[in-house]
Amino acid sequence: MTSLCLNIVKQLDYKYLVALLYCFSVVVHSVELDHAHNRNSQFNEIKTAFELPLLKVISNAINSNAKSKPSASSGKVKLKDYAGKVVYIDFWASWCTPCMVSMPMLNNLRNKYHQAGFEVIAINLDNNPLLASEFISAMNIDYPIVFDEGGIIANQYNVTGLPSAYIIDANGKIKVVHRGFKKSDVSFLEAVINKYLDEIDPISEETST
């Protein structure tokens, strides 16, 4: 049986094999996460809620975005204001080396799918918010960046390393937990984002905008 499988693999074009393996990994990963969510849905629904202060360094960028005005007008970002959207919650800090790679790439994904109902909310865990401001001052970031003083929200999400991301579907449920970041992760994350954007009810999306 093993030799038969090896012969089949040898006959496959390399590109098709890579694509097949990638699709299989996406399906398996998604099924595992959905199964884990079903076992723990009540806890996930509790820990997804938060209201955090907006870092002033990007307040102008947020205020220029009509979809985010309700949150930014009070100087705080509330997750409930993004109901009906797919949200990527990104925990990060200025000392996090992979975050220097992830944030510009997340910004590209956010701008690519924003009109379809996708948003990124970055939650900073520095001891001093000024460190975060200095970190992102040289970056052109268009999504909300908030400050989690004392790591209270991070504890609720069981964050154990940075960056740690949580993809929340339009119904407010955590569907994917993604820890760490490397450039090759973008294709997987984009596939997951598209999966949950496709599930958005057009009527609820229109209402939330």
Image (cartoon, rainbow, N blue to C red):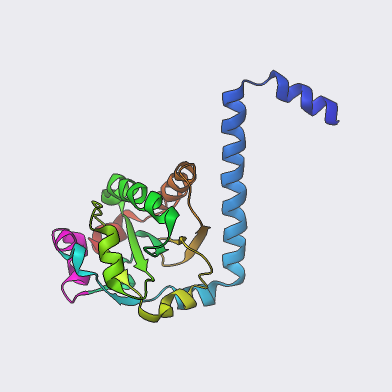
The answer to whether 8 is drawn above or below residue 39 in the figure is above
Near-viewer residue (106 or 68): 106
Quarter of the image that includes the N terminus:
top right
Residue shown at 40%/81% (left/top)?
Answer: 150
Horizontal side of residue 19 vs 163, given as left or right: right
Near-viewer residue (170 or 184): 184
Where on the picture, by quarter, is residue 92?
A: bottom left
The answer to whether 40 is drawn above or below residue 181 in the figure is below
The answer to whether 138 is drawn above or below residue 123 in the figure is above
Horizontal side of residue 178 vs 199, given as left or right: right
> Does the stretch in magenta take in 69?
yes
Near-viewer residue (141 or 89): 141
Dominant SS type (magenta)? helix
Q: Which residues are magenta?
A: 60-75
> Does the stretch in magenta take in 141?
no
Horizontal side of residue 64 vs 160, given as left or right: left
Residue 170 rendering spot, x and y as whole percentages = 39, 61
Residue 146 rendering spot, x and y as whole percentages = 30, 69
The answer to whether 30 is drawn above or below residue 16 in the figure is below
Quarter of the image that includes the C terminus:
bottom left
Report if residue 81 is visible in the image. no
Where on the picture, by quarter, is residue 186?
A: top left
Residue 77 rendering spot, x and y as whole percentages = 27, 72
Where on the picture, by quarter, is residue 205?
A: bottom left
Residue 162 rendering spot, x and y as whole percentages = 47, 62
Residue shown at 56%/53% (left/top)?
Answer: 30
